Every structure is written in structure tokens, then in C-alpha cells.
Image: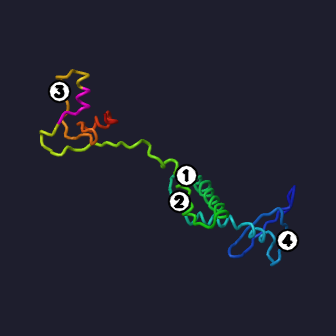
Amino acid sequence: LPTKYRWYSCMKWKDKRDLMMISTSHVGERGSSNKPKVVEDYNKLKGFVDQSDQLSAYSPFVRRTTKRYLRAFFHFVMQTAVVNWCRLFCDTKGTIQLNEFKMILVKTLLRDIFSEPSSPRTTHKLERSESGSKESRRTCTGCYKELREEKGRPYATNHAKKVSSRCSKCHKYFCMECFLNYHKKCV
């Protein structure tokens, strides 16, 4: 097919399936095995693309979404990038399955995030006192202190919460709210 600037070659080749091609660099040339030269070049260079598509098909991106552009992004960009990283990894370190590579990749990316706890663990905790009788219930230290500052000692003595839970380290009595909010370290 001649155009204003160059010649184009259009062809259909039947091998295992129909293959239709347009080429500007192969114009009717035949290769060694009576195949057109354009088909031989295609078969020689298509190897990695077919392997990449095959690997992507074995472990597809599993998140379904109604937004088509998100699915296209995750398939074409992320899945293709992971397959390419896996291919480079296999070329340098040895063979590995794609799913194993994905797990290594996720663990590596999340290692810094989950390596240390975000806050230091407390060495004290809230526990119930041994006997559950009324005599073992005591005034909550946090509630008493708060009420004493606001309304005075006599009011705090009569109106502070009575609890049977205490700190395991300093043995002061606290309600759950005061323990979590105010009791950061044992004195």
C-alpha cells in the first residue's frame, strides 16, 4: 500500500491462530522457512511480552471495582510493574514464582512500618482485686483527685466512684477511664 511518505505492508498469516500485521520495515520479504520475515521477527521479539501476559493471567489483580479506570490502572501499571520486577529479580537472583515474589515485595515494603510498636508497652495493667466483696471496693484515685480539685475534699469523699480494680504495679484503685487517661506511670 503506497502512501505519500512510505510503503506499508499489510498481511494476514495463519499459524496456530490468525495473525494480522501492518509493517513499514518489511515489504513482502520472505524468511528462511517460507514464513514472511515480519512474522519471524515478531515471533523472535514477542517472547517477554507473552510471558508477562501469561504471568499476569496466573495471578491477576484481585480487587474488583466498578470504576473501570482504577482497574485499568492497577492492571496495566501495577501488575505490569510487579511482573517486570519479578523478571529482573529472576535474571539476577534465580527463579521464583510470581506469588512468592509478591509476598517478598509486600513484606519488604511493610517491614519499616510494622517493625516496632508505635508506643512503648506499659509495664502495669488494671486487675481485679482478689475478693469481690463490698469491703474490697475502694475510691477511684483519679476520680477522687479530680472531684477534690473541683468541689473540695468532703464532696469528693462522698461522690467519687467505688471500684474493685487496681493497678498491678502500684496497687492504687482506678476505674477504667481514669486508668487509661491519667495513670501513665506508677509513682
Is 145 included in the stretch rendered in magenta?
A: yes
> What separation in Å lies between label 4 and label 1 (alpha carbons)?
50 Å
Report the span colored magenta: 138-146
Q: What residue type is labelled 3?
A: Thr
Q: Which amino acid does label 2 sit on?
A: Met
Q: Give the residue drawn at x 41%, y 42%.
A: 120
Image disc number at residue 29: 4
Local packing at callout 2 (Cα closer than 10 Å; few below 14, some 14-19, many 20+) is few
- Between discs 1 and 3, the one toward the N terminus: 1
Q: Which of marks 3 and 4 is in front?
A: 3
Residue on which disc 2 sits:
103
131 vs 81, nearest the viewer: 131
Q: Which amino acid does label 4 sit on?
A: Glu
Residue on which disc 3 sits:
157
Residue on which disc 1 sits:
109
Q: Where is residue 19 in the image (x, y as percent from the top left)?
A: 72, 70
Local packing at callout 3 (Cα closer than 10 Å; few below 14, some 14-19, many 20+) is some
The quarter of the rendered structure image containing the N terminus is bottom right
